[in-house]
Image: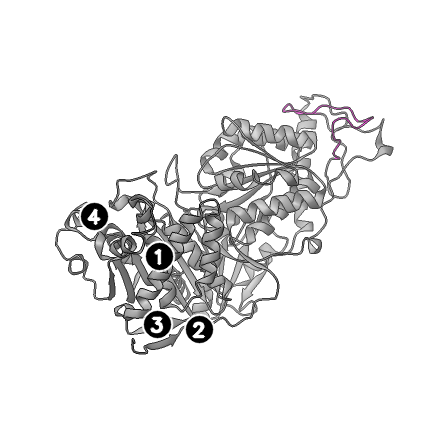
Amino acid sequence: MAEEMMVKELEDVVVRFSGDSGDGMQLAGNMFSNISATEGNDISTFPDYPADIRAPQGTLTGVSGFQVHIGSDKVYTPGDKCDVLIAMNPAALKTQYKYCKPQSVIIIDTDSFTKRDLEKAQFQLENPFSELGIKNEVVEAAITTMCKESLKDSGLDNKTIMRTKNMFALGLVCWLFHRDLSVGEKLLREKFARKPEIAEANIKVMYDGYHFGENTHASVSTSYMVPPKNQNKSGRYMDINGNKATAYGLIAAAEKAGLQLYLGSYPITPATDILHELAKHKSLGVKTVQCEDEIAGCASAVGAAFAGALAVTTTSGPGICLKSEAINLAVIAELPLVIIDVQRGGPSTGLPTKSEQTDLLQVLYGRNGESPLPVIAASSPTDCFDAAYTACKIALEHMTPVVLLSDAYIANGSEAWHLPDLASYPAICPPYVKPEMAGAWTPYQRNPENGVRYWAIPGTEGFMHRIGGLEKSSETGAISTEAENHHLMTVLRAEKVARIADDLPELEVEGDADDADLLIVGFGGTYGHLHSAMDALQRQGKKVALAHFHVINPLPRNAAEVLLRYKKVVVAEQNMGQLAGFLRMKVEGLSHLYQFNQVKGQPFVVQELVDAFLKIMED
């Protein structure tokens, strides 16, 4: 019987799964996340996909990674570096070792470290650990051999057996952290419900990995526990990524508004999964159309908006370029349209599987003419639900296109999500025409309180009308080229968007709101990293606050007051200073504004933020 080994209790831990694109690292990582969330841990994940559709096996460009941060309490990021690295081949070890802490445990499949494998990963020495200077604790397991032995009587072919290696690694990691495999069993039986023999083979291998660790202690001196503190509010939870949460938010808004949801889209990484998810929900009245191109996707959504649907189009930065003319049609026609931009690395094709915040100025100003529209930014995978709901509410109630910014990091990353009570969400009340308006109504007749034009759904008796891309008379709705009318309509469209701020929450300041020496400012998916940096600085005794913009246009009513309240303000963003420039343009007197900018296609590193912010505070 194996001797008892020491069990160490941790507040949090970061695990990174890595291997070839076909090694199933995303599945193993997702399952470990779900198992941990079920046991009460908070989670934050980061899938790191290769840009190649399918690089040659064992090569450096084909490595796929999945990092998960699990904690006893709230975790805001997937972590800077990992405590455990699973490297299924030499290429994974070479490209992913940089994410290891000095004390990290590294798990490898020794069967995949042959001379040929080392050559494909461009190692010069026979010992990759010496070449990389690795002094970490290494768990060497003949995973391929053990999977073949485990399933030799299963009747499965060799290719199918090789696909279970990820489950052996998962089982081993679950042993290391005392995870319950019953949740893994359930997940596998659900995933392979139509192929029960595949499910049972993967379950067997997963348990074999667990028992390998249990019986051999996996060459490590310590196993670990990350006990939950059970501070989450009671209710039902699920592990959800940003794209799925966005889809659910759109469905919830359509139900609340009593409208059919229409999505006109064209597949583009990393936004396509929103189309995939919505296509599953025809029973809820969702209509999805995969159009022939980006332009058609947006134009069809404009038509759906005119017809009275909750109209949405999804894309990434390159698609925003193509959709701009149709978006401007929605601006001048004053139709409700939600445009979802899941940002990726650019320019051009750029880095399709990586994340940036480089589309901000494009969505604010990337159209001809004076064409203002609201811009909202989701801050986390779970916040994508609320952000999508808010975008729909603004579009429908203010008769305007709205851009919702997401990014690849939060779109693909996941968190534990508390299923909301839709009854607690605010009502969505579009400004429909009223029967008493018939006869005297014109298409651009407005509510005097908020400047929003009334919405007449085609087919409503007494409200026949036409709108379009040519400027119209404010009074009659007929085509007009009059100079004064064009100026008036330009002003009215801008004022309508500006007045939206009256219906939105003010900018919230977290941390040392009353006496901070530095205010950190950001938007979108950087929230978790900026919050973690603030927490780290506060632990050092520094007075720091955080203001994170959820709505960028129009700026919250108190934005200027907040930004001018502090001695030093730093805007941190994954671009070359787009939000900083926008704030300087909108708020006078920001001479104390500093910038932290990175465009690496990767999330911020919290320690780099802390070091940069400390330097600003000391200047």
Color style of the picture: one colour
Query: Range of the magenta residues?
Result: 454-472
Q: Amino acid at mark 1?
A: Val
Crowding around mark 4 (Cα neighbors within 10 Å: few <14, some 14 to 19, many 20+) is many
Is 87 drawn above or below residue 13 in the view shown? above
Q: Are marks 1 and 4 in contact (CB under 8 Å)?
A: no
Q: Quadrant of the C terminus?
A: bottom left
Q: Percent from the top left, x then y, of residue 327?
A: 57, 32
Residue located 67% across and 37% down the image:
260
Q: Which residue is mark 4?
A: 121
Residue located 60% across and 40% down the image:
281
Mark nearer the N terminus (1 vs 4): 4
Q: Amino acid at mark 4?
A: Ala
Q: Which residue is mark 2?
A: 539
Crowding around mark 3 (Cα neighbors within 10 Å: few <14, some 14 to 19, many 20+) is some
> Mark 3 against mark 2, which lies toward the viewer?
3
Q: CA distance from mark 1 to mark 4?
A: 27 Å
> Mark 1 against mark 3, which lies toward the viewer?
1
Q: Which residue is mark 1?
A: 205
Mark nearer the N terminus (1 vs 3): 1
Q: CA distance from mark 4 to mark 3?
A: 31 Å
Is 471 drawn above or below residue 376 in the view shown? above
Q: Is residue 482 left or right of residue 145?
A: right
> Mark 1 against mark 4, which lies toward the viewer?
1
> Mark 4 against mark 2, which lies toward the viewer?
4
Residue located 53% across and 28% down the image:
291
Mark nearer the N terminus (4 vs 2): 4
Q: Which residue is mark 3?
A: 223
Q: Amino acid at mark 2?
A: Arg
